[in-house]
Amino acid sequence: MAKQVLIRDLPANVKAWIEEESYRKRMTQKEFLLGILEDAAIAKDSPSLFDELMPSPVVIPNALPFTFIDIFAGIGGFRVGLNRSGGRCLWSCEYDKYSQKTYMRWFGEKPFGDINELKTDADIARVIPDHDLLSAGFPCQPFSIAGVSKKKSLGHAHGFDDVKQGNLFFKLAKIIEVKRPPVVFLENVKNLKSHDGGRTWDVIHSTLTEELNYKVFVNIIDAAAFVPQHRERVMIVCFDRNVFGDNPPFSFPEISNNERPLLKNILEERVDSKYMLSSKLWNYLKEYAKRHKAKGNGFGYGLVGPDDIARTMSARYYKDGSEILIRQNGKRPRRLTPLEAARLMGFDEERAGLFGHTNGFPQVVSDTQAYRQFGNAVVPAVIEAVGKEIVAVMNWHLHQKDNGCLLKRNGKKSLSQKEKDGIYINEDAPAYV
């Protein structure tokens, strides 16, 4: 017969710690707490007075504590940006095994793998924890200019006709429908709104607004205000009308064009010669650019120096580095190093020590995979800037409610007083995964 133990008067931060650690360790709360109690019973690894049991919390001005999940997580650009906005990640999902490896090293947890394994509403409800904000940089290749051109040339379907990738938006919509997060924060390529004559965006927009009942805000932001790279991405922020009403006072951050960062801020002083282009590749790129220039096309390499801003770094950068080649006096140009690519995307080691990244953002995969990962990533500083505007709406909502409830969902079952006072540790409670 199942037995329960009710622990009363647990401080909120302890309850949150139990939830987070049991999830991170892929254990039930019962298994996690029993392990701690068993260790204590046999005096195993007893802490001394000088042990620091938990890291000191980071104080973020004007932030509110909120929880989020990180879907199609990549290497965690959304996570870093939302952490800096005051958020705490409860669950992550990423299919690529190399990105999982980087994510594990950076954040201490391995993301859930294939989102398509969540086949039913019950699967989604069981595996994904309740959260305040859902973030997702959903796969963009079917909607990107490069991706569409490539698929057309090969005679392949694209957009929502791409069964393998395009339909992942509908999986995302199903998760939103089942979990009803108060806020949804999505990112995609600039071309999303114009793809297929605007029909792709019409389907996305109508799904979010009409079927799911969210108020949708859309804007294209160039990351060049934060990093030395032109990187235009469409940001989609959605507020549940059942929570925030029809007119939440949201606006995208005002982006200043003054004093934009330059490449000299991210370049290494000494670079291994292996990153220099070979004579064969450099000659090929020059001839390629020459041919296309004669045809009136704009295709070609991007040669830049310390006082420039780079083009957009793509996931194909590992192939020849042609979009961002660093000029070298008296030598052939070179690619960015992986460390420079990390800095170019805003995964900078100077701020990595904040928000839990005590070891920085170390490279744990090959150069090829690192370039792929950075080329597919979002710029954390952009996410942080938008995240702070989302938090401002949360603050507004908090002050509008007499009951002091931040993100109350209409129709959600109310807790009993016993449940409010304590936490049940049930041996039959399912694990998070």
Image (cartoon, rainbow, N blue to C red):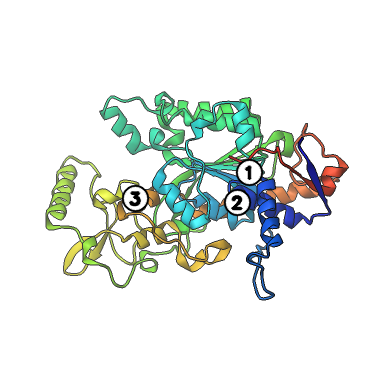
Q: Are marks 2 and 3 in contact (CB under 8 Å)?
A: no
Amino acid identity at mark 2: Gly
Q: Identify the residue at image location x=66%, y=68%.
A: 46
Please state the horizontal and vertical placement of residue 85, each as a whole percent of the image. 61, 56
Q: Residue furthest bottom?
A: 50
Q: CA distance from mark 1 to mark 2?
A: 10 Å
User: Is residue 49 at all visible to an observer of this figure?
Assistant: yes
Who comes first in sequence, dot 2 or dot 3?
3
Numbered disc 2: secondary structure: helix
Q: Nearer the viewer, residue 4 or 116?
A: 4
Label 2 neighbour load within 10 Å: few <14, some 14-19, many 20+: many
Q: Identify the residue at image location x=69%, y=46%.
A: 30
* Closer to viewer: mark 1 or mark 2: 1
Label ID, residue 387: 2
List the residue tagged with mark 3. 369
Who comes first in sequence, dot 1 or dot 2?
1
* Closer to viewer: mark 2 or mark 3: 3
Q: CA distance from mark 2 to mark 3?
A: 28 Å
Amino acid identity at mark 1: Leu
Label 1 neighbour load within 10 Å: few <14, some 14-19, many 20+: many
Q: Is residue 33 left or right of residue 111?
A: right
| Up-down relation of residue 56 to residue 113 (above or below) | below
List the residue tagged with mark 1. 133
Q: Residue furthest front?
A: 42
| Up-down relation of residue 12 to residue 139 (above or below) | below
Numbered disc 3: secondary structure: helix
Who comes first in sequence, dot 3 or dot 1?
1
Please state the horizontal and vertical placement of residue 173, each as a whole percent of the image. 57, 30
Amino acid identity at mark 3: Gln
Numbered disc 1: secondary structure: strand
| Up-down relation of residue 398 to residue 209 (above or below) | below
